[in-house]
Image (cartoon, helix red, strand yellow):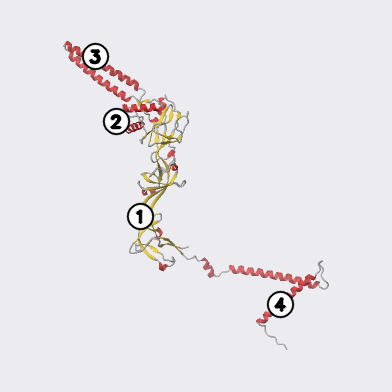
């Protein structure tokens, strides 16, 4: 009698091994049967049923393997998508806060104002000549008859710039603009400026006092016009007639005096009562002669060559430059025929209202051209007291206006005014010619610590409830809160996000110390 033992683990293993051997035997038998099959598709005698059964088992085995693979992949995907509540919370939690720090620096702290500027001539003038030339020529619209200086040409003192209706327009040195005709007998600073310009060209003004248009100045003006190849215009077309009439009146008065003297002499010889009457007639004749002589002197002083306002341009320095000529020969003279620039180059800019009080004359300026890399140093020359309107202008002078200057705050060529408070910077040395007309960056040093000081970012300084201002110095490990120490400081000037600090109360703070700026919490 056989006793059946319950299956053990070892027995289960043996059974699985037997099953695998049986399956392998079946596979080998199926392979052999397949090899024995004829190539024409017919099965061997007596083996057709066994071959079909083997093929069915092979197909079933392939389906089982494919299903197992699919089930395994589904299980893996499902396992990846299923998370516990604890895992979900851990994944959603923010990362730990990080420490933002910086280092203490020792350097010169400066407060700067940065604006844009343009390198331009100190003086830019728009000139509209022609009104006087038209009057001298008998009326009509003035016409350009010659262009002596083309755009871009250099101009020296005493040179003709352009000819209008046969009359010259020339330049002399002077800062005061022309605003009237300069005639014999006139006095003023503009007359003195004319005299200085004439003398600089080698035409002395004689004994005329400075600022008085006298005989010496008239002679110098005549010599200047003659050197330019033109005849000077008379101060008044009727001067010749008036001068002739005054000379005739003086001659007549002289004859009257001579007649009265003769009558007096005869009366004295006769010894009669007519002596007193003859004496009175001589006195009257002498008085008339004195009046006639005075009128003649006045007529002579008023007569002579003048310098019309539309023939003269005063420029601050030479050589100057012709920037534009807005008409050709034979064309009517437009408003703003000439645009001239003169004087040492300066840099013009405009300050916004919130920076106006930060910039003062005398402050140092760094000038940089980003386009060329050229740099220069300068000084603030002036800051306007009132803002200029933001507007564009043609820069042309109105009809009949001899010249119009943009002044120190103008823009060359009638450029648009950016508004703001006009700022003028004077270079400390002559600027590189390549900077002419370029836009540059101006960095104005508004304040400076003067010497190296300890500086930290503004955000590193904190004020406590006790009113103490402190910074936090970090240890070797920035995250180690136990190694941190607070240092009380006194804050000084600030600029560009940095502030000057000085340790107080015995605290220690040195260049290179790492300090807490903030704790960054995601």
Tell me if residue 185 can be seen: no
Discs 2/3, front:
2
Q: Which residue is mark 2?
A: 209
Q: Which residue is mark 1?
A: 451
Q: Determine which quarter of the picture holds residue 149.
A: top left
Tell me if residue 3 can be seen: yes
Q: CA distance from mark 2 to mark 1?
A: 56 Å
The mark nearer the N terminus, 2 or 1, is 2
Residue placed furthest toward the bottom: 1
Q: CA distance from mark 1 to mark 3?
A: 95 Å
Q: CA distance from mark 3 to mark 4?
A: 175 Å
Q: CA distance from mark 2 to mark 3?
A: 40 Å
The mark nearer the N terminus, 3 or 4, is 4
Q: Which residue is mark 3?
A: 259
Task: Residue 117: give x, y in percent of width and height.
Answer: 42, 45
Q: Which residue is mark 4?
A: 19
Residue placed furthest toward the right: 45
Q: Determine which quarter of the picture holds residue 190.
A: top left
The mark nearer the N terminus, 4 or 1, is 4
Task: Residue 411: give x, y in percent of width and height.
Answer: 42, 40
Q: Residues within 10 Å of mark 2 (few under 14, many from 20)?
A: some
Q: Secondary structure at mark 2?
A: loop
Q: Residue at x 28, y 16 (%)?
A: 252
């Amino acid at each position: 009698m056989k006793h059946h033992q319950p299956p053990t683990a070892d027995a289960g293993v043996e059974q699985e091994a037997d099953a695998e051997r049986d399956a392998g035997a079946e596979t080998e038998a199926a392979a052999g049967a397949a090899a024995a099959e004829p190539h024409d598709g017919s099965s061997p005698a007596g083996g057709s049923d066994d071959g079909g059964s083997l093929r069915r088992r092979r197909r079933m085995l392939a389906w089982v393997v494919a299903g197992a693979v699919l089930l395994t992949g589904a299980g893996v995907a499902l396992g990846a998508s299923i998370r516990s509540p604890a895992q979900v919370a851990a994944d959603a939690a923010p990362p730990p806060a990080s420490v933002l720090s910086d280092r203490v620096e020792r350097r010169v702290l400066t407060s700067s104002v940065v604006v844009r500027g343009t390198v331009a001539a100190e003086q830019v003038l728009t000139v509209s000549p022609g009104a006087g030339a038209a009057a001298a020529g008998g009326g009509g619209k003035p016409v350009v008859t010659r262009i002596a200086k083309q755009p871009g040409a250099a101009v020296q003192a005493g040179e003709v710039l352009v000819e209008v209706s046969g009359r010259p327009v020339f330049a002399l040195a002077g800062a005061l603009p022309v605003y009237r005709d300069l005639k014999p007998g006139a006095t003023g600073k503009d007359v003195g400026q004319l005299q200085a310009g004439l003398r600089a060209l080698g035409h002395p003004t004689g004994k005329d006092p400075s600022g008085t248009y006298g005989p010496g100045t008239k002679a110098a003006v005549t010599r200047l016009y003659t050197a330019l190849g033109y005849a000077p215009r008379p101060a008044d077309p009727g001067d010749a007639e008036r001068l002739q009439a005054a000379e005739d009146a003086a001659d007549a008065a002289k004859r009257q005096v001579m007649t009265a003297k003769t009558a007096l002499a005869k009366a004295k010889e006769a010894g009669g009562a007519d002596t007193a009457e003859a004496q009175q007639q001589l006195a009257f004749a002498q008085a008339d002669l004195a009046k006639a002589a005075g009128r003649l002197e006045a007529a002579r002083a008023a007569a002579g060559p003048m310098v019309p306002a539309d023939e003269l341009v005063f420029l601050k320095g030479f050589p100057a430059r012709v920037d534009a000529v807005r008409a050709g020969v034979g064309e009517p003279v437009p408003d703003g025929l000439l645009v001239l620039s003169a004087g040492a180059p300066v840099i013009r800019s405009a300050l916004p209202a919130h920076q106006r009080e930060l910039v003062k004359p005398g402050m140092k300026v760094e000038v940089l051209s980003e386009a060329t890399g050229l740099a220069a140093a300068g000084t603030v020359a002036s800051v306007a007291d009132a803002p200029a309107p933001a507007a564009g202008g043609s820069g042309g002078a109105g009809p009949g206006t001899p010249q119009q200057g943009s002044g120190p705050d103008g823009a060359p060529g009638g450029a648009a005014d950016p508004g703001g408070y006009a700022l003028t910077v004077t270079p400390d040395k002559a600027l590189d010619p390549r900077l002419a007309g370029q836009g540059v960056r101006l960095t104005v040093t508004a304040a400076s610590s003067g010497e190296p000081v300890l500086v930290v970012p503004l955000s590193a300084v904190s004020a406590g409830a006790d009113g103490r201002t402190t910074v936090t110095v970090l240890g070797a490990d920035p995250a180690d809160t136990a190694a941190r120490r607070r240092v009380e400081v006194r804050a000084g000037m600030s600029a560009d996000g940095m502030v000057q600090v000085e340790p107080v109360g015995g605290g220690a703070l040195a260049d290179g110390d790492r300090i807490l700026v903030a704790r960054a919490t995601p």
